[in-house]
Image (spheres, helix red, strand yellow):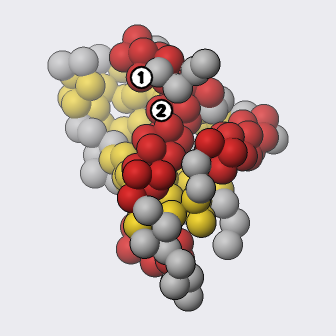
Amino acid sequence: MQEFCIQTEPFDIQDEQSALYRAQTQVGALVSFVGFMRDRNDGLAVERMLLEHYPGMTERALAALVDEAKARWPIEGVRIVHRVGWLTPGDPIVFVGVASQHRAAAFRACEFLIDALKTRAPFWKKELTHQGEHWVEARLTDEQAAQRWSG
């Protein structure tokens, strides 16, 4: 199984989870995170969102995040799926799943991966609202969450 994927097509959450533990009897824990497109952001109704990435650079960033998670925790499997292109409210955007022999490693690695993904992978969001289109700025709270993993 490929450890990460960037795609325009929707993904099946159950299929992604199942692939992480299927035929791996050593797995005792599976932790996953799914991020969905919201219909509101900063008080504005959002009709659609365009997610863009920098091909090649984004894949290298995801590979580095996976390698770092594997170096920090004893994990049996990891999977990141990130969508790009136009999305509508309710669409799943990102899946991060981690399988491990024990829950602590799975929880920590999953949390690290989503925090790092938000700040270290080159993705850009453009929202379409009734006021027009605008690029979404990085959030301070995402930077603060990622800081706890440094050092």
Rendering quarter of residue 1: bottom right
Local crowd size for mark 1, using a 10 Å CA cut-off: few (<14), some (14–19), many (≥20): some
Q: Residue at x 73, y 40 (%)?
A: 64
Q: Distance between the residues labelled 2 and 1?
A: 6 Å
Q: Circle 2 is placed at which residue position?
A: 115
The spot of residue 149 in percent (x, y) is 52, 26
Foreground of the two, 116 or 77: 77
Residue visible at 47% across and 32% down? Answer: 115
Label 1 element class = helix
Q: In which quarter of the image is the C terminus?
A: top right
Q: Which of 91 and 70 is in front in this view?
A: 70
Q: Which residue is drawn at 33% across and 43% down?
A: 37
Residue that protrudes farthest toward the bottom in the picture: 23
Q: Residues within 10 Å of mark 2 (few under 14, many from 20)?
A: many
Q: Position of residue 51 (x, y in %)?
A: 53, 37
Report which residue position mark 1 lands on: 145
Quick check: marks 2 and 1 in contact, CB under 8 Å? Answer: yes
Q: At numbered mark 2, what does the secondary structure look like: helix, strand or loop?
A: helix
Where does residue 92 sit, x and y in percent of width and height? 38, 54
Asked if residue 126 can be seen in this view, the reply is yes
Name the residue type under label 2: Asp
Q: Is residue 66 left or right of residue 139?
A: right
- Please say whether residue 130 is visible from this viewpoint: no
Q: Picture quarter containing residue 24?
A: bottom right
**Number of numbered discs present?**
2
Residue at x 47% of width, y 21% of height: 148
Name the spot of residue 48 as percent of width and height, x first. Answer: 36, 39
**Amino acid type at image mark 1:** Ala
